[in-house]
Amino acid sequence: MVFDGGIDEFIEGLNEPSCAIFCYDFNTKSTKRISKKGLYAMDLWIDNQDRIYFSGFENINEPGKIYQTSLTDTTLIELIEGTRPSVGG
């Protein structure tokens, strides 16, 4: 199961805690963070090939980005940079 959730990290200038993308493995009952530390991640979307997309930012004064990753290779690929990009299914 892939989900986003609030975390106890803060982005300077933002008045709320950050969010991160996680994966929960029902077999091992373990949770793994997919988004990198220091990145506010949101707007999670998964395609039919199990690729994971989400938007996020590291600094409120810089443009947000849309990222792609997967459960098998959690390398983050920056796809789009924009003012306030978001992902929707």
Image (cartoon, grey):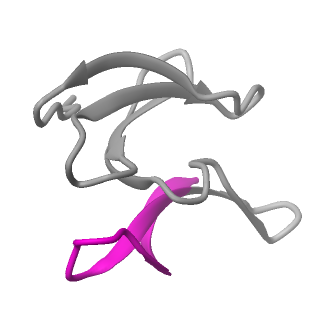
Is 54 a magenta residue?
no
Outermost residue on the left side: it is 83
Q: Residue 4 appears in which quarter of the rendering? A: bottom left
Residue 65: where, in percent of width, then height? 31, 30
The residue at 71%/33% (across/down) is: 74
Whether residue 66 is visible, yes or no, is yes
Q: Is the stretch drawn in magenta largely helix, strand or loop?
A: strand
Whether residue 44 is visible, yes or no, is no
Viewport quadrant of the C terminus: top left
Is 5 a magenta residue?
yes
Give 48 or 21, whichever is nearer the viewer.
Answer: 21
54 above or below 10? Answer: above
Residue 78: where, in percent of width, then height? 46, 20
What stretch of residues is rendered in magenta? Answer: 1-21
The residue at 22%/35% (across/down) is: 63
Residue 30: where, in percent of width, then height? 80, 68
Give 39 or 12, whichever is nearer the viewer.
Answer: 12
Residue 24: where, in percent of width, then height? 67, 61
